[in-house]
């Protein structure tokens, strides 16, 4: 499996408090069957580490991973909390995934934002937006999801929302899966959180078949990494 949304890079956001915890998190992912991981630290008002600092932290993590003989491949990106004209900051204080054309975007969970319009703006600038944990935005309609996909954006959901959700989120994910609206399933890994990827993959395979499971956990995430 390939996991394109994680918070494993140490001491840059709320994901990992130190290098030792990051090593633990990588080992859990490896045991889960993950071969490739994108590190996507938050870019928000409270987490605003410079790109140079992120790259330095990434290099240190890679060296420590190799020292610990952890065999997963690591790539760097960000989870960008959307702000006005964020697309103009790509390459300055915003990073795409593995320096490709895909960018992971998150939004406020309850305060309305026209996510489909934001996706359109990024696409017009030559980027492919991935909507992080789309199930969390209470105002995001299924019509919006379909529109985002039709224009070339990607929809991601967290693995835990597939197997352990209830209420509105459960209904939203169920309908999205039924209509093939979901492109990628991710862990959104934070220290102390069960990542649920293997359980979610087994559920998808049983419900929708091996081909669909491969698309969500391997094929589509690989395209993202390859840019």
Image (tube, grey):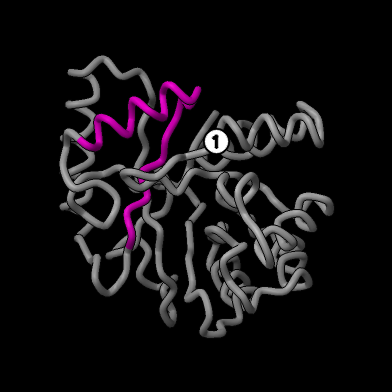
| Residue 184 visible, this angle | yes
* Number of numbered markers: 1
Residue nearer the viewer, 133 or 149: 133
Q: Which quadrant would the N terminus be assigned to in this image?
A: top right
Residue 39 in percent (x, y) is at 36, 44
- Graded by Cα atoms within 10 Å as few (under 14), some (14 to 19) or many (20 or more), the crowding at tag 1 reads many
Measured from the top left, where is residue 15 in percent x and y? 29, 50
Q: Is residue 31 above or below residue 62?
A: above
Task: Where is residue 86? Give x, y as percent.
Answer: 41, 74
* Residue at 32 percent of width and 34 percent of height: 25
172, 60: nearer the viewer: 172
- At horizontal 70% and vertical 51% (from top left) the residue drawn is 182
* Residue position for label 1: 197
Whether residue 155 sits left or right of residue 66 in the image: it is right
**Residue 148 as seen in the image, left or right of residue 46:** right
Depicted 178 relative to depicted 37: above or below: below
Q: Quadrant of residue 89?
A: bottom left
Magenta stretch in the rendered image? 21-42
At x 37%, y 64%, the residue is 90
Residue 112 covered by magenta stretch: no
SS at mark 1?
helix
- In percent of width and height, residue 193 lies at 39, 45
Q: Determine if residue 129 is in view.
A: no
Residue 113 shown left or right of residue 173 in the figure:
left
The stretch drawn in magenta includes residue 39: yes
Going 40% across and 64% down the picture, which residue do you hit? 80
């Amino acid at each position: 499996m390939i996991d394109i949304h994680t918070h494993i890079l140490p001491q840059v956001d709320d994901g990992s408090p130190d290098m030792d915890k990051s090593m633990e998190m990588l080992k859990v992912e490896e045991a889960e069957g993950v071969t490739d991981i994108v590190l996507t630290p938050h870019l928000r008002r409270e987490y605003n580490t410079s790109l140079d600092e992120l790259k330095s932290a990434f290099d240190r993590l890679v060296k420590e991973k190799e020292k610990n003989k952890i065999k997963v491949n690591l790539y760097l990106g960000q989870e960008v909390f959307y702000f006005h004209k964020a697309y103009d900051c790509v390459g300055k204080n915003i990073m795409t995934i593995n320096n490709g054309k895909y960018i992971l975007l998150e939004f406020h969970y309850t305060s309305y934002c026209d996510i489909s319009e934001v996706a359109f703006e990024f696409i017009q600038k030559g980027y492919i937006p991935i909507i992080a944990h789309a199930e969390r935005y209470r105002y995001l309609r299924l019509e919006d999801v379909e529109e985002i996909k039709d224009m070339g954006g990607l929809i991601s959901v967290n693995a835990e929302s597939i197997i352990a959700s209830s209420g509105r989120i459960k209904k939203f994910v169920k309908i999205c899966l039924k209509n093939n609206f979901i492109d990628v399933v991710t862990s959104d890994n934070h220290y102390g959180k069960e990542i649920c990827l293997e359980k979610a993959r087994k559920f998808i395979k049983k419900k929708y078949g091996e081909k669909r499971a491969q698309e969500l956990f391997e094929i589509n995430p690989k395209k993202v990494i390859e840019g």
